[in-house]
Amino acid sequence: MNQKHIFKKGDFLLMGAVLLFSCFLYALFSFRNSTPAAYAEISVDGETVTTLDLNQDTVLTVTGYQGGTNTVTVSHQAVSVTEASCPDLVCVHTGQIHNTGETIVCLPNRVVVTIVQGTD
């Protein structure tokens, strides 16, 4: 019975090296993007309208494109869109964000909430 091996020793070494490198890159980017945030920057139609401190619980209604509204809530150092006048409510279903670089987007109202480290 002649049985052929599909993989050779070198193939396993290459797969292991690629897997280790992928894990390293994942850990690096996860660590870099998981820094505690300081502010939530809110923009409408590409222009920043306000910046909210994540250390202060706040509820703010933002008027977006063509009069649409989004209620932005800061609670326990996280931000979320709790109400919106858009039909799909994707921004509301996004939930809370709290890490630097995370965003909530409401396309119909053109409102973007982005977590930033500082305002310097």
Image (cartoon, rainbow, N blue to C red):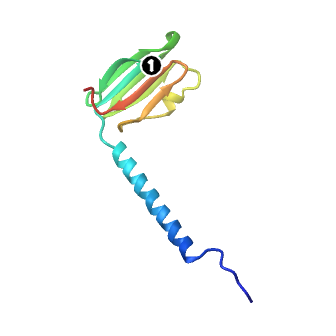
Q: Which residue is mark 1?
A: 46
Task: Give coordinates of residue 112: x percent, y percent.
Answer: 44, 24
Task: Give the number of marks.
Answer: 1
Q: Quadrant of the N terminus?
A: bottom right
In which quadrant of the rendered view does residue 72 lie?
Answer: top left
Q: Quadrant of the C terminus?
A: top left
Task: Give coordinates of residue 104: x percent, y percent.
Answer: 45, 30
- Image height check: is 35 above or below 67? below
Classed neighbour count for the residue bearing mark 1: other residues with Cα under 10 Å, few (<14), some (14–19), many (≥20): few
Report the residue at 36% width, 39% height from top: 99
In which quadrant of the rendered view does residue 87 lie?
Answer: top right
- Image height check: is 39 above or below 49? below
Report the residue at 53% width, 66% height from top: 15
Report the residue at 50% width, 71% height from top: 13
- On screen, residue 2 versus residue 79, left or right, reads right
Q: Relative to the observer, which residue lies in front, 59 or 63?
A: 63
Task: Give coordinates of residue 79: x percent, y percent.
Answer: 37, 31
Residue reaching furthest to the top: 66
Q: Relative to the observer, which residue lies in front, 42 or 67?
A: 42
Task: Give coordinates of residue 92: x percent, y percent.
Answer: 49, 29
Residue type at the position of mark 1: Gly
Residue reaching furthest to the bottom: 1
- On screen, residue 120 versus residue 87, left or right, reads left
Q: Element under label 1? A: loop
- On screen, residue 62 versus residue 89, left or right, reads left
Residue reaching furthest to the front: 10
In which quadrant of the rendered view does residue 80 lie?
Answer: top left
Report the residue at 34% width, 18% height from top: 50
- Image height check: is 38 above or below 52? below
